């Protein structure tokens, strides 16, 4: 495993609140401390090897978009400066630097908020079977990677690690979180996606789709988790885009393609990843950061 990747954290002075596929969430006083590791999951299986600097890149991209969208809706970010963290975090400053966020303790709204501007992935499979995605009727004759007439909101359930999220209809989502909350996050998700997609296009990136999460804080809905990263979105290079086929992307598609080439059964245990696949994937993430923000690590 490359020496500059971090796949596990163990902060004895902090209580582990939750561990996700990529992020470890700790309690730090009145806040949560979200640590973006270099873990990578493909087909809902966590790989054994980390992708160097992936967590730092995801953190930086999320911060960029949180700043970009804060006029649309408040978010949970308090600070990314480790020197401002509660004292119990300070023994871990070296690991936390650049790959962590101190955030508000929001109560999670339990649906994945997915917005699609192009047709691909599970949406394409759904459409080919039914002519719809999550109960939304779409025009006939759409092909792989084609731009939709307008972005659509397609919620899903939030599954545990190792299980798949399931697409649900608007009516099913309203039953889970209530009609008023559903309509609010639907409108906000589409507004954020539309603004971000227009910006990214000028930087040479198509944001084909993305997913967001929201939570309640002080009785109001705020944006939480990560935002518009290569892990939560499909980023396609504009100069290579062509409808009717699958696209290259600035994310872990390189890993997925390798796993498909060795006929991986999409179940644990994960096979070892060659060094070339690991380093090329890292380069894809770095390229996404630079194209969007002009920044490098």
Image: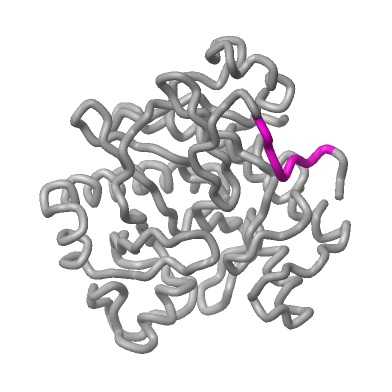
Name the spot of residue 58 as percent of width and height, x first.
59, 40
Name the spot of residue 241 as percent of width and height, x first.
57, 65
Q: Residue at x 75, y 49 (%)?
A: 51
Q: Is residue 285 left or right of residue 141?
A: right
Confirm whether the magenta stretch covers residue 288.
Answer: no
Name the spot of residue 282 as percent of width and height, x first.
75, 48
Q: Does 208 sit above or below residue 269?
A: above
Q: Residue at x 55, y 46 (%)?
A: 19
| Quarter of the image that includes the C terminus | top right
Q: Does 184 sit above or below residue 249?
A: above
Q: Residue at x 86, y 50 (%)?
A: 1
Question: Which quadrant would residue 155 be assigned to in this image?
Answer: bottom left
Q: Does 96 sit above or below residue 129?
A: above
Question: Which quadrant would residue 46 be assigned to in this image?
Answer: bottom right
Out of 116 and 266, give the one closest to the viewer. 266
Q: Which residues are magenta?
A: 4-11
Q: Is residue 275 left or right of residue 208?
A: right
Q: Is residue 219 left or right of residue 95?
A: left
């Amino acid at each position: 495993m490359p020496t500059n990747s971090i796949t596990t954290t163990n902060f004895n002075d902090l209580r582990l609140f939750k561990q996700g596929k990529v992020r470890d969430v700790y309690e730090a006083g009145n806040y949560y401390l979200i640590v973006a590791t270099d873990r990578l999951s493909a087909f809902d299986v966590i790989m054994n090897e980390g992708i160097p600097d992936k967590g730092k890149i995801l953190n930086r991209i999320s911060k960029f978009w949180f700043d970009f969208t804060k006029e649309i809706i408040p978010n949970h970010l308090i600070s990314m400066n480790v020197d401002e963290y509660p004292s119990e975090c300070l023994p871990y400053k070296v690991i936390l630097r650049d790959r962590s966020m101190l955030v508000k303790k929001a109560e999670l709204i339990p649906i994945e908020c997915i917005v699609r501007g192009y047709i691909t992935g599970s949406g394409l499979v759904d459409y080919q079977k039914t002519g719809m995605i999550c109960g939304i009727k779409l025009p006939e004759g759409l092909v792989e990677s084609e731009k939709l007439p307008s972005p659509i909101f397609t919620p899903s359930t939030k599954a545990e690690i190792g299980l798949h999220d399931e697409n649900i209809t608007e009516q099913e989502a309203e039953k889970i979180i209530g009609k008023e909350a559903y309509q609010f996050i639907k409108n906000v998700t589409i507004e954020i996606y539309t603004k971000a997609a227009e910006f990214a296009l000028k930087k040479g990136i198509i944001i084909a789709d993305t997913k967001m999460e929201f939570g309640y804080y002080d009785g109001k809905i705020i944006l939480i988790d990560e935002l518009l990263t290569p892990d939560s979105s499909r980023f396609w290079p504009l100069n290579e885009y062509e409808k009717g086929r699958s696209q290259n992307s600035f994310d872990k598609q390189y890993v997925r393609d390798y796993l498909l080439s060795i006929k991986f059964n999409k179940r644990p245990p994960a096979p070892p990843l060659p060094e070339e696949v690991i380093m090329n994937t890292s380069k894809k993430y770095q390229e996404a950061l630079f194209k969007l923000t002009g920044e490098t690590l």
